[in-house]
Amino acid sequence: QDDNLPKALRLRGRAHGGKPVGSLAEIGEVLGKKLEERGFDKAYVVLGQFLVPKKDEDLFREWLKDTCGANAKQSWDCFGCLREWCNAFL
């Protein structure tokens, strides 16, 4: 079972598909609920927000902070998770 692996590693090799937003690195239950309340309920929807500004780190991290209150570490880890996934599969 891969439940003991870090979230960034669990997402590698898999489509973000229907995974809940809380499955992204450093998002978890609290930030996930805030994102869901704003319509970002699945990991692929947040991936879209990552891709729209052409994977720009500053824009994505600022968006995540403004949208759900992510702190610097949370936004950095989530950005890194999505960047690694895109580098591997896009």
Image (cartoon, rainbow, N blue to C red):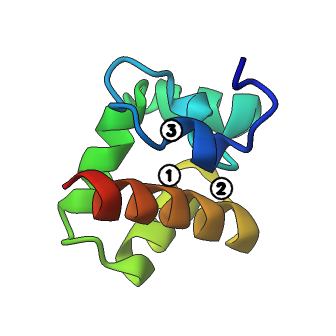
Q: Quadrant of residue 77?
A: bottom right
Identified by mark 3, the residue type is: Leu
User: Disc 2 and disc 1: Cα gap in Å?
Assistant: 6 Å
Q: Is residue 79 left or right of residue 40?
A: right
Query: Circle 1 sits in a helix, a strand or a loop, which is it?
Result: helix
Identified by mark 1, the residue type is: Thr
Instruction: Tell me which label, 1 or 3, sits earlier in the chain.
Output: 3
Between 16 and 59, the residue placed more toward the observer is 16
Q: Quadrant of residue 51?
A: bottom left
Question: Which x, y percent locates residue 7?
Answer: 66, 41
User: Disc 2 and disc 3: Cα gap in Å?
Assistant: 23 Å
State the quadrant of the C terminus.
Answer: bottom left
Query: Circle 3 sits in a helix, a strand or a loop, which is it?
Result: helix
Instruction: Tell me which label, 2 or 3, sits earlier in the chain.
Output: 3
Question: Which x, y percent locates residue 69?
Answer: 65, 55
For the image, the number of numbered tags is 3
Q: Residue at x 66, y 58 (%)?
A: 70
State the quadrant of the N terminus.
Answer: top right
Question: Which x, y percent locates residue 59?
Answer: 36, 76
**Given contact means CB atoms under 8 Å apart, are the residues at marks 2 and 1 in contact?**
no
**Given contact means CB atoms under 8 Å apart, are the residues at marks 2 and 3 in contact?**
no
65 relative to 13, above or below:
below
Question: Which x, y percent locates residue 58?
Answer: 43, 82
User: Disc 1 and disc 3: Cα gap in Å?
Assistant: 22 Å
Q: List the residue tagged with mark 3.
A: 11
Q: Residue at x 40, y 68 (%)?
A: 60
Q: Nearer the viewer, mark 1 or mark 3?
A: 3
Query: Circle 2 sits in a helix, a strand or a loop, which is it?
Result: loop
Q: List the residue tagged with mark 1.
A: 67
